[in-house]
Image (cartoon, helix red, strand yellow):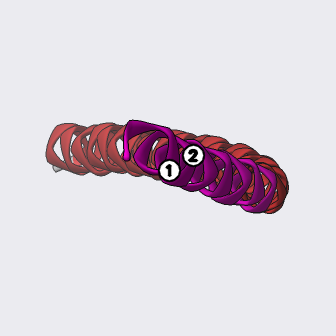
């Protein structure tokens, strides 16, 4: 009788130790998964922030370039108008001299 009792107690203790080990492994795995998820989320957020900063910087540069190009376009257009006027005057002069 005592032998059965000791055997049952041993089995219960073994089962509890095995159950504790399984629970410990499960908890540690969940903690490591949570740490990995947190690190990944932090890295994704950092990448999003750097991309947003890059886009902001480039859009500012793009607006500055457009403004510079707009002013340059106006000055080139004015020069072209002057050249057209000079060419027109030259054509009129050629027509007068050819008659």
Magenta segment's dominant SS is: helix
Q: Secondary structure at mark 1?
A: helix
- Choose between 17 and 46: the one closer to the eye: 46
The quadrant in which residue 85 appears is: bottom right
Q: Nearer the viewer, residue 85 or 20?
A: 85
Q: Secondary structure at mark 2?
A: helix
Camera-side residue of 60 and 50: 60
Residue at image x 66%, y 59%? 81
Q: Eyeballing the image, is 29 above or below 66?
A: above
Q: In this orientation, which residue lies closer to the viewer: 92 or 32?
A: 92
User: In which quarter of the view is residue 43 placed?
Assistant: top right
Q: Position of residue 38 (x, y in %)?
A: 63, 52
Q: Nearer the viewer, mark 1 or mark 2?
A: 1
Instruction: Tell whether position 53 is magenta.
Output: no
- Residue shown at 83% from the left, 59% from the top: 71
18 to 30, vertically: above or below: above
Circle 1 Cα neighbour tier, 10 Å, few/some/many (<14 / 14–19 / ≥20): few
Position of residue 8 relative to residue 97, above or below, is below
Does residue 31 appear anywhere in the picture? no
| Region of the chain picked out in magenta, as a range | 73-99
The residue lying at 80 percent from left, 48 percent from top is 61
Task: Give the residue pinned by disc 2.
Answer: 93
Q: Does 84 appear in magenta?
A: yes
Q: Tally the numbered discs.
A: 2
**What distance separates the C-alpha of mark 1 from that of mark 2?**
5 Å
Disc 1 + disc 2, Cβ < 8 Å: yes
* Identity of the residue drawn at 57% across and 46% down: 93
Disc 1 target residue: 96
Residue 17 x, y percent position in the rendering: 40, 39
């Amino acid at each position: 009788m005592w032998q059965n009792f000791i055997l049952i107690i041993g089995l219960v203790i073994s089962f509890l130790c095995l159950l504790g080990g399984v629970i410990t492994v499960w908890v540690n795995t969940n903690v490591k998964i949570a740490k990995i998820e947190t690190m990944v989320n932090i890295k994704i957020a950092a990448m999003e922030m750097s991309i947003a900063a890059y886009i902001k910087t480039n859009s500012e540069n793009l607006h500055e370039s457009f403004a510079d190009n707009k002013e340059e376009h106006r000055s080139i257009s004015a020069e072209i108008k002057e050249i057209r006027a000079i060419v027109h005057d030259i054509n009129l002069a050629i027509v007068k001299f050819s008659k």
